Image: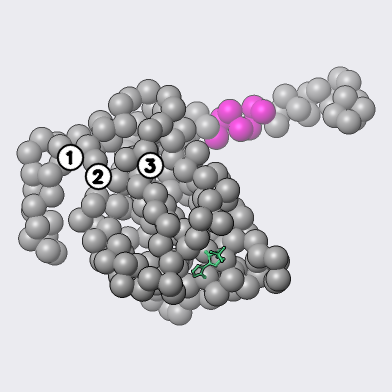
């Protein structure tokens, strides 16, 4: 588990998983899930290469801001398919509810995550030097019916993080409250800039 700065929700990261005491059965696999296990990650952030890190870090920064537990991995679906399959097959057992997967070029990592992992997958297409990221975008967004990947913009790391928070907030009222505050702050930020524009003119922004 990664170290975090002060989360928006103002609670300990480990509390995210302390929704109940004891353990419960995973109905599909009949495996025991220990709900007290603070090492479980709600979001798995995975990228095809360390060269993707600057973009993926933007997603992680959002998760940290909202105090969402996460794991972060570098796994190439092409260069180490066996490790990839093990990662994706065991994600649910690690408590993962959403995967954020970023890759570039022939970016099959998000799509293959969606093929193996039954929860939602958010794909981040990396900008590339040869084709500008359109290669990554098309590789990720053009999924066959039945296996969706929620694809954000090229290099859209922050939006991937926000989308993951929105998904988790559907069943987490504390997170929903923090998300609401974020949306209000964002609106107020634009409003104050427009007020400054009206009072001081456009030169104030140059
Ligand atoms: N990649 C890695 N394995 C399979 C793919 N498609 C992607 C990475 C990265 C790009 O290839 O996600 O965006 C270039 O990787 P590298 O390691 O050569 O910098």
Asked whether the beta carbons under mark 1 and mark 3 sit within 8 Å of each other, the answer is no
Asked whether the beta carbons under mark 2 and mark 1 sit within 8 Å of each other, the answer is yes
Q: Label 3's element?
A: helix
Specify the segment rendered in magenta: 183-189
Q: How crowded is mark 2: few (under 14 residues within 10 Å), some or many (20 or more)?
A: many
Residue of label 3:
169
**Is residue 152 shown to the viewer in this render?**
no
In the rendered structure, which disc, 1 or 3, sits on the residue that comes first in sequence?
A: 1
Q: Residues within 10 Å of mark 3 (few under 14, many from 20)?
A: some
Lateral position of residue 166 relative to residue 136, left or right: left
Distance of label 1 from label 3 (alpha carbons): 21 Å
Mark 2 CB near ligand 1 (8 Å cut): no
Lateral position of residue 53 relative to residue 74, left or right: right
Image spot of residue 136 (x, y percent): 59, 69
**Is residue 16 shown to the viewer in this render?**
yes
Q: Which of 87 and 11 is in front in this view?
A: 87
* Image mark for residue 104: none
Label the magenta part by its dominant secondary structure.
helix
Residue 20 colored in magenta in the image: no
Asked whether the beta carbons under mark 2 and mark 3 sit within 8 Å of each other, the answer is no
* Image mark for residue 40: 2
Q: Give the mark toward the camera: 1 or 3.
A: 1
């Amino acid at each position: 588990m990664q170290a975090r700065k002060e989360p928006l929700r103002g609670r300990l990261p480990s509390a995210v998983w302390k929704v109940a005491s004891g353990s419960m059965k995973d109905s599909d696999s009949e495996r025991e899930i220990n709900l007290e296990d603070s090492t479980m990650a709600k979001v798995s952030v995975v990228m095809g290469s360390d060269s993707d890190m600057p973009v993926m870090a933007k997603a992680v920064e959002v998760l940290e801001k909202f105090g969402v537990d996460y794991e972060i991995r570098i796994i190439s679906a092409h260069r180490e398919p066996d490790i990839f399959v093990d990662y994706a097959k065991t994600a649910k057992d690690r408590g993962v509810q959403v995967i954020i997967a970023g890759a570039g070029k022939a970016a099959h990592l998000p799509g293959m995550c969606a093929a193996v992992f039954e929860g939602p997958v958010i794909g981040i297409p990396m900008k590339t030097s040869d084709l500008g990221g359109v290669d990554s975008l098309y590789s990720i967004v053009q999924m066959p019916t039945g296996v969706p990947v929620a694809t954000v913009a090229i290099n859209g790391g922050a939006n991937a993080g926000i989308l993951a928070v929105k998904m988790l907030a559907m069943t987490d009222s504390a997170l929903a409250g923090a998300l609401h505050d974020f949306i209000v702050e964002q609106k107020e930020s634009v409003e104050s800039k427009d007020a400054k524009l009206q009072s001081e003119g456009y030169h104030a922004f140059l």
